[in-house]
Image (tube, helix red, strand yellow):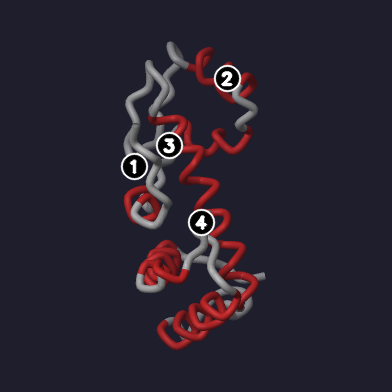
Amino acid sequence: AAHWELEEESELIAFLATHKAEAGDNTTFKNSVYSDASKHLNALYPTYRGAAKSQSSCKTKWNNLKKSYNVVKDIKSLSGFAWSDEHGAGVTPETSGAWDAHARVRAHPLSKPFAHKGFPHYAAVEALMPSAAKG
C-alpha cells in the first residue's frame, strides 16, 4: 500500500486544485486526473515508502481527505472546544465527556484522532469543496 507523508498529501491537494474546474459536483475528479496526479507525485517524490502512488491510491487519499475535512468542519461547529489545525479539538479532562458524547451521538468514529491532533490540510481542502448555497 502507498504510504503518504504530509508533504505528499499537500502536493496532491495542490495538484487537484489546478484541476478544480474538472471536478464534479462533489469534488469528484475523473480517473484520468488521479492518474496524472500519481505520475506527478511519483516524479516529484521518487524515493517513497510503501508502494508507488497509483491512480487508485490518489483517489482513495482524496476521498479520505474529504472525509477528514467534513469531520473537522463538524467539530469546529461544536461549542466547548477550541479547534487548532495543529492540536485538534484540545479535549481536556473537563471536556472529555462532551467529546465522547459527540463521537457517539453524531456517529463520528472518525472524530477520535482529532481529539488531540489537528488537520493541517483544512484550508486547502476547503478551497476545493463546493460552496454551500447562501440564502
**Circle 3: is it few (<14), some (14-19), or many (20+) Cα within 10 Å?**
some
* Depicted 51 relative to depicted 5: above or below: below
The residue that mark 2 highlights is: 100
Confirm or deny contact between disc 4 and disc 1 (CB under 8 A): no
Number of marks: 4
Confirm or deny contact between disc 1 and disc 2 (CB under 8 A): no
- Looking at the rendering, in which quadrant would you find the C terminus? top left
Q: Nearer the viewer, mark 1 or mark 3?
A: 3
**Circle 1: is it few (<14), some (14-19), or many (20+) Cα within 10 Å?**
some
Question: Which of the labelled discs sits on residue 73, or is there none?
Answer: 3
State the residue at coordinates (56%, 74%): 49
State the residue at coordinates (60%, 75%): 31
For mark 4, give the secondary structure: loop
* Depicted 67 relative to depicted 107: above or below: below
Q: Nearer the viewer, mark 3 or mark 2?
A: 3
For mark 2, give the secondary structure: helix
The residue that mark 4 highlights is: 25
Q: Earlier in the sequence, mark 3 or mark 2?
A: 3
Task: Give the x, y percent position of residue 6.
Answer: 42, 62
Residue 61 lies in quadrant = bottom right
Disc 1 marks a residue whose amino acid type is Asp
State the residue at coordinates (38%, 47%): 131
Disc 2 marks a residue whose amino acid type is Asp
**Circle 2: is it few (<14), some (14-19), or many (20+) Cα within 10 Å?**
some
Question: Which of the labelled discs sits on residue 109, or is there none?
Answer: none
The residue that mark 1 highlights is: 85
Q: Nearer the viewer, mark 3 or mark 4?
A: 4
**Circle 4: is it few (<14), some (14-19), or many (20+) Cα within 10 Å?**
few
